[in-house]
Image: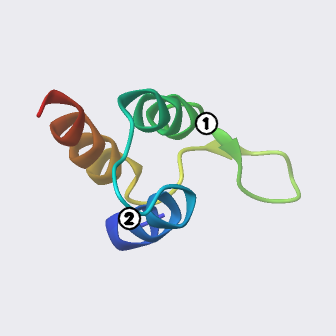
């Protein structure tokens, strides 16, 4: 998930303000390895660290 995709998702859920609880929940989801293919290999979604960094920065404001 890219930063722009995360912004779109959060804007759909709450167009005016993003609550810290919502952003922290997304950070927790992104911080957990997901199943990436049918062989059961687990890994992190692409660019997850960039999105986590972005959400952390928004939470601190």
Give the residue at the far right of this rendering: 38
Label disc, if present, on residue 7 of the rendered structure = 2
Q: Residue 18, how many percent across, how many down?
A: 37, 46
First reached walking from the N terminus: tag 2 or tag 1: 2
Question: Measured along the vertical axis of the image, is residue 12 above or below residue 50?
Answer: below
> Which of the 4 image quarters holds residue 3?
bottom left
Nearest the eye: 61 or 35: 61
Q: Is residue 58 left or right of residue 8?
A: left
Question: Mark 1 sits on what residue?
Answer: 33
Q: Nearer the viewer, mark 2 or mark 1?
A: 2
Q: Residue 12, how many percent across, how many down?
A: 54, 67
Disc 2 packing (10 Å; few <14; some 14–19; many ≥20):
some
Q: Is residue 49 left or right of residue 13?
A: left
Question: Measured along the vertical axis of the image, is residue 17 above or below residue 52?
Answer: below
Q: Residue 33, how many percent across, how many down?
A: 61, 36
Label disc, if present, on residue 61 of the rendered structure = none
Question: Measured along the vertical axis of the image, is residue 25 above or below residue 4?
Answer: above
Tag 1 secondary structure: loop
Disc 1 packing (10 Å; few <14; some 14–19; many ≥20):
few
Tag 2 secondary structure: helix
- Give the spatial CA distance, label 2 vs label 1: 21 Å
> Which of the 4 image quarters holds residue 32?
top right
Q: Are marks 2 and 1 in contact (CB under 8 Å)?
A: no
Nearest the eye: 38 or 14: 14
Q: Residue 7, how many percent across, how many down?
A: 38, 64
Q: What color scheme is it?
A: rainbow
Q: Is residue 34 left or right of residue 38?
A: left
Q: Residue at x 33, y 42 (%)?
A: 52
Identify the image quadrant of the C terminus: top left
Q: Residue at x 44, y 64 (%)?
A: 11
Q: How many marks?
A: 2
């Amino acid at each position: 998930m890219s930063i722009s995709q995360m912004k779109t998702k959060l804007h759909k859920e709450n167009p005016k303000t993003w609550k810290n609880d919502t952003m922290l929940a997304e950070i927790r989801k992104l911080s957990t390895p997901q199943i990436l293919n049918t062989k059961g290999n687990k890994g992190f979604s692409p660019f997850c660290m960039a999105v986590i960094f972005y959400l952390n920065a928004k939470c601190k404001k």
